[in-house]
Image (tube, rainbow, N blue to C red):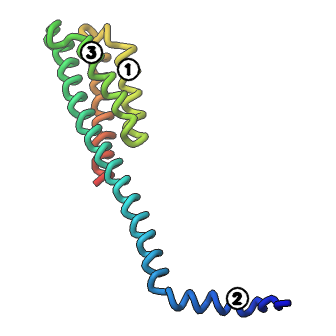
């Protein structure tokens, strides 16, 4: 009957194998760490790129919304100051802001709420124009800080 080998010999065998194959083990660990870091970095780059693209679209729509506000209030131009066009821009700003930092998302929601509440009085009430324009500015500043933070 064969006697079982003592546990210390199993340990010795394992250490000997580890030493013998140390280059392969170190290479495997380095490859796994490198692949993990590369995947993480690619994901971060994509998140930042999506955030920047969304931020530029939001800025574009904020500028167009400000133009609608100005034409509606100051010149009472029903074509260029059409509130339906304003709805398009304010909704796009609110929707795209979900890809931005929380401060931009919050300001965008406040802009949407202000527009929803006051858009019908925009052509005849200076306080409404000022309130909406001020919120457009606050939203723009929050979006710009998002761009600055993603660089």
Above or below for 148 versus 94: below
Label 2, label 1: how many angstroms apart (C-alpha)? Answer: 74 Å
Q: What residue sits 47% from the left and 75% below the top?
A: 29
Q: Earlier in the sequence, mark 2 or mark 3?
A: 2
Q: Secondary structure at mark 1?
A: helix
Mark linked to residue 126? 3
Instruction: Specify few, some or many for label 2: CA neighbours under 10 Å numbering under 14, 14-19, or 20 or more.
Output: few
Q: Quadrant of residue 109?
A: top left
Q: What residue sits 49% from the left and 80% below the top?
A: 25
Q: What residue sits 16% from the left and 8% below the top?
A: 76
Residue 38 visible at all: yes
x then y, percent, for residue 129: 27, 18
Q: Earlier in the sequence, mark 2 or mark 1?
A: 2
x then y, percent, for residue 13: 64, 90
Residue matched to label 1: 114
Report if the CB atoms under discs 2 and 3 are less than 8 Å apart.
no
Q: What residue sits 21% from the left and 10% below the top?
A: 82
Above or below for 56 versus 42: above
Instruction: Specify few, some or many for label 1: CA neighbours under 10 Å numbering under 14, 14-19, or 20 or more.
Output: some
Q: Secondary structure at mark 2?
A: helix
x then y, percent, for residue 122: 27, 12
- Give the side of residue 57 with respect to residue 142, left or right: left
Residue matched to label 2: 10
Q: Secondary structure at mark 3?
A: helix
Q: Residue furthest right?
A: 1
Q: Name the mark nearer the viewer: 3 or 1.
A: 1
Q: Name the mark nearer the viewer: 2 or 1.
A: 2
Above or below for 29 versus 62: below
Report if the CB atoms under discs 3 and 1 are less than 8 Å apart.
no
Q: Quadrant of the N terminus?
A: bottom right
User: For this rendering, which residue is in front, 58 or 38?
Assistant: 38
């Amino acid at each position: 009957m064969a006697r079982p080998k003592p546990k210390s010999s199993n340990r010795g065998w394992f250490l000997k194998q580890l030493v013998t194959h140390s280059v392969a083990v170190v290479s495997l660990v380095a490859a796994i760490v490198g692949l993990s870091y590369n995947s993480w970095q690619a994901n971060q780059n994509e998140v930042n790129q999506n955030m920047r693209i969304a931020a530029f679209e939001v800025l574009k729509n904020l500028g167009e919304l400000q133009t609608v506000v100005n034409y509606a209030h100051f010149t009472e131009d029903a074509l260029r100051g059409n509130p339906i066009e304003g709805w398009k821009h304010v909704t796009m700003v609110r929707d795209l802001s979900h890809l931005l930092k929380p401060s931009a998302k919050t300001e965008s929601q406040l802009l949407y709420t202000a527009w929803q509440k006051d858009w019908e009085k925009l052509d005849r009430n200076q306080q409404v124009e000022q309130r909406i324009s001020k919120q457009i500015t606050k939203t723009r500043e929050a979006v710009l800080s998002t761009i600055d933070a993603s660089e």
